[in-house]
Amino acid sequence: MDIKRIGEAGQLRSMDVVNGFEVRPGFYLQNGATAIEGGVSFTVHTKNGTACTLVLYERKAKEPFAEIPFPENYRIGNVYSMIVFGLDIRKIEYNYRVDGPKDLKKGLLFDKERYLLDPYAKAVTGQSNWGEKPEYSRDCYRARVVSNDFDWGRARRKPADMRDLIIYELHTRGFTKHHTSDVKHPGTFDGIREKIPYLKDLGINAVELMPIFEFDETRDTRYVNGKKLLDYWGYNPVSFFAPNTSYSSEKEFNREGTELKYLIRELHDNDIEVILDVVFNHTAEGNENGPFISFKGFDNNIYYMLTPDGKYYNFSGCGNTLNCNHPVVQNMILDCLRYWVTDYRIDGFRFDLASILGRSEDGSPLSKPPLLERLAFDPILGRVKLIAEAWDAAGLYQVGTFPSWNRWSEWNGRYRDDMRRFLKGDPGLVKAAAQRMSGSRDIYDRESRGDTASVNFITCHDGFTMWDLYSYNEKHNLDNGWDNTDGDNNNNSWNCGAEGWTDRQDVIRLRKKLVRNAFAALMTSQGVPMMYAGDEFLNTQYGNNNAYCQDNEISWLNWDLLLENHKISQFVKEMIRFRKKHPVLRSRGKNALCGLPSVSFHGEEPWKFKEDYENHLLGVLFAGREKDSDTDDIVYVMMNMHWEPHTVRLPELPLDYFWEIFSDTADEPKNGRLPGGEIRLEERSIIILEGNQMGRKGNVICL
């Protein structure tokens, strides 16, 4: 190792020369690769590793052109940091080799011959062509140095209130990949961008993107019935800090993430927030038989939960489990989320199998998990939405009990299950449905959890689409290649009399009515509604309730159905607008002056709610007044899930109010102002009423 003295701006600067490269200690507090004028700072850490080497490649080259060991005196604590001068970031790729002890029972897997991806890589090379893995990166992953100079402009957005969100879950590729999407860049971030006018017209104000962190869709490539199956959903992260480059319409060398940023900026310009579905419960490295990508080679026994004999705990169902409450892993997750918020302006995160984030290093649940608490109180994340999938694959179910600090919302699996059963006419569900419609007050204490603890959904990516929910009694997953053993068997679905496709018009009419019922219930339930992309125009997965590997017409949205089912789509739009119009559906607000309680339950007679096992009729009356409003907001949702019609007497309103029908899901809907105090609910239908004031219509003064 040589030492040079180089004069610069009148000062002396010491340089080391390692393998022909001028180097000096780098930025120890900045993990990953940071470009500076004339060089790059590379920073990584390992507790148990004994030596670290930076490996440099020319772009797309099979072999490295240089390997630069970190000088031992460049290590501070467990951190190696080194600035390498004379590198052109447009031409290089990099990874690492780490040496250290190997003891399988202690979980130490160091191997200086393995090439490791930077855990803080901002871009992963060789992943840009969907479904293809280039030969040069077959045995290892490499990173690229990314320039961060995107101009977000001067605009500053005030985050939307969580209670006002209507979330639209979508898959970046599947949303526009089908030829019917009519976009220039199908299956990409730009494809979504081209559909923003559609999203705006639909009325949603938040998109929840299924995983966009870099993942390798080719990791488990299989062929079934002549179809190439891939890891389509992307719930196997390779790199937490890098966007999936195959979702970009063009190559973005050293500008990875730019197209995504343009998408986010334009969504924000249209008042649509962006929520990322993030997977911190496991990685693509899998178990003992899985690949070495990154964490196994840096500190396997720190990043993963291990059994006493060095095996992998598998609370995720995917081979390994991240050791989320180890301080090192906590810091990595927190750094990651801060990065996406500051560099990409992300508005919220949905945490996949979030109960794992609350497990201790031995896998036992913690009453006050350090990671979840840190996320709840972190200043950078202070206005970010935090949504937990409050269960994991090992049976830890925390819906209603997820540690929240009044900051976390939850995917309400109880809402999905109870409402599916009630809406298809199962007995004994009317009491549960009443609770779900009123914000699941039996699960979430309003005083400590507020109005937004429950994210309500009937369908999502995991399971049947809305149309399939009423078209199939059983899952049809044979195309996945597992003999129909994969996917949930408890779908709470109903085929309405014919399994799958049918030309029976009576079955088709019934299915469409049940879809209208589901959307009517979802959009009039207190809590935060979430819908799955394509459900608004009856998209189908042909009965596949676990389409995680189907990169084809099974998963792609068929936009021809939007024209074919425009009446359903219009109904969904109207329900979204109705929800936005009525604050009483989104929060408790102030008490109504008309004397009505904020929420009340009714039967065929007002104020007489029947919990009988065979009862299928439920009336939910919402009443309240927003701050600074001079008008009470009154909505009555009457739900008859019986296969026979019922006549219902309506609750009386104050003298200057009258009932008016907003929506009737029956095949021959009623409309207009109600002259009397009774109304007939047709079988399996929902009627939604507004309590309007004389001289007003829909809370707008009539002129």
Image (tube, rainbow, N blue to C red):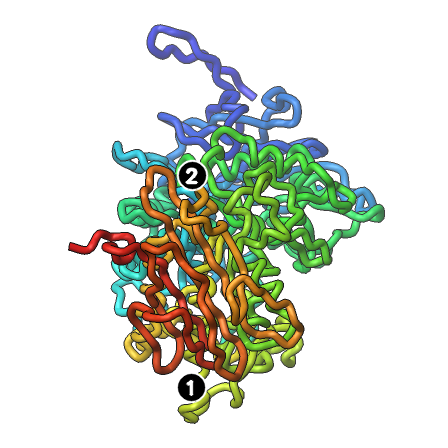
Q: Residue furthest front?
A: 655
Q: Residue furthest left?
A: 703
- Residue where numbered disc 2 is placed: 145
Relative to residue 593, is residue 184 depicted above or below? below
Q: Residue at x 50, y 21 (%)?
A: 24
Image label count: 2
Q: Residue furthest top?
A: 10
Relative to residue 77, is residue 647 depicted above or below? below
Q: Is residue 203 left or right of residue 212?
A: left
Q: Residue at x 37, y 38 (%)?
A: 627
The answer to whether one can see residue 299 in this image is yes
Q: Earlier in the sequence, mark 1 or mark 2?
A: 2
Tell me the amino acid under the disc marked 1: Ile
- Residue 508: mark in rendering: 1
The quarter of the picture where residue 340 lies is: top left
Q: If the image is split into quadrants, where does the C terminus sit?
A: bottom left
Q: Is residue 182 left or right of residue 521?
A: left
